[in-house]
Amino acid sequence: MNVLGIETTCDETAAAIVSPGEDGRGLIRANEVLSQIAEHAAYGGVVPEIAARAHVEVLDRLIARALETAGMRLADLDGIAVAAGPGLIGGVLIGLVTAKTLSLVARRPLVAVNHLEAHALTARLTDGLAFPYLLLLASGGHTQLVAVKGVGEYVRLGTTIDDAIGEAFDKVAKLLGLGYPGGPEVERMAEAGDPERFALPRPMLGRREANFSLSGLKTALRIEAERIAPLAERDVADLCAGFQAAVVDVVVDRLRVALRGFGAVAGHPTALVAAGGVSANGAIRRALAAQAGQAGLAFVAPPLALCGDNGAMIAWAGLERLRLGLVDDLTAPARARWPF
Ligand code: KG4
Ligand code: ZN
């Protein structure tokens, strides 16, 4: 079974082909990703119209290259999976129309995949992980703690009531004059910084629901930055270190709450899984691994290339759905919002 996966919901254009591998894992036959970071960098964030245009320009070539890398033709595919949302609607439409066209031409089933579900199932692609597991999905647009019980069976234990974690990293980077995307820049600066120089708040600590709130932390950081402006490199490093340490504390606390609530909705988890671009952060990864260890759980985080947006995760989620007969028809809608 070979499934093509197409991803165009944000600022990465991606096409990949995945087949079932050994021990329940997936086998990635091709995984082409083209980041648009350069196109958006000057604006300090993703510009939806620029993103959509860039997807149109490269998507068909990227799909052709994925087929070539896998040594396949359209006829070798068993399904066409596409992220049909949530995301920037212009980009989602481009991926979806392309996938529908291929589905029609190749006479292969279309699978409309939820982008978040694809992040959630990546640990099964890479590690063949069994259900149920606790997922921390943290990206530029989403922050969720989810009990993953099965394909299509997700119970949300917590979410953010304002900024997503990645968004907070991006905003802090912008505020401090660092590049975009901000996460890796803030992490790099934090390495040399003193996390204790600034007393930054840990919002939501101790709350009984596993929700996040980050805008207060960002505001506190802005006030400190303005107080000591102009900022020297040392100041920026200390602010980044302080911010990252606060985020880590919040994540650990919220995770503990979610672990406590897990049993009632999904039984005993097999593992703690991190997904989404923010799980590339070393400090966050280490803290999650330590928490998992304390709870007696395995910790699974996808390799860096599969943390951010990619086509392999879409192809894999498509493959999982296809195996269960969960296919879509040509009326499948593009969705800017699509809770999962
Ligand atoms: O999953 P992703 O590639 O795209 C979506 O948002 O769906 O995540 C991108 C987000 C950005 O906000 C980026 O700043 C953040 O992940 N990110 C990081 C790191 N690398 C990427 N945040 C913190 N530390 C990092 N090393
Ligand atoms: Zn994503």
Image (cartoon, rainbow, N blue to C red):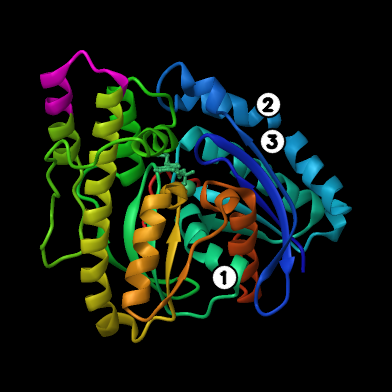
Q: Nearer the viewer, residue 23 or 79?
A: 23
Q: Nearer the viewer, residue 307 or 192?
A: 192
User: How many residues crowd around disc 1 within 10 Å: few (fewer than 14), some, or many (20 or more)?
Assistant: many
* Residue at position x 29%, y 44% in the image: 244
Q: Is residue 223 magenta?
A: yes
- Is residue 155 visible in the rendered image? The answer is no
Above or below for 53 versus 340: above
The segment highlighted magenta reads 222-233
Task: State the SS at label 2.
Answer: helix
Q: Which residue is mark 3?
A: 59
The correct choice, above or below, for 42 with respect to 269 in the image is: above
Q: Is mark 1 within 8 Å of ligand 2?
A: no
Name the amino acid, label 3.
Answer: Leu
- Choose top left, top right, bottom left or bottom right for residue 312: bottom right
Q: Quadrant of residue 275?
A: bottom left
Q: Amino acid at mark 1?
A: Arg
Q: Which residue is rendered at x = 37% and y = 75% of the image?
A: 293
- Closer to the camera, 306 or 158? 306
The residue where tag 2 is placed is 57
Label 1 residue SS: helix
The alpha-carbon separation of the residues under discs 2 and 1 comes to 32 Å
Residue identifier under label 1: 124
Cβ–Cβ below 8 Å for labels 2 and 3? yes
The quarter of the rendered structure image containing the C terminus is bottom left
The magenta stretch spans residue 337: no
Taking the image as shown, residue 203 lies to the left or right of residue 48, namely left
Q: Position of residue 49 (x, y in %)?
A: 49, 23
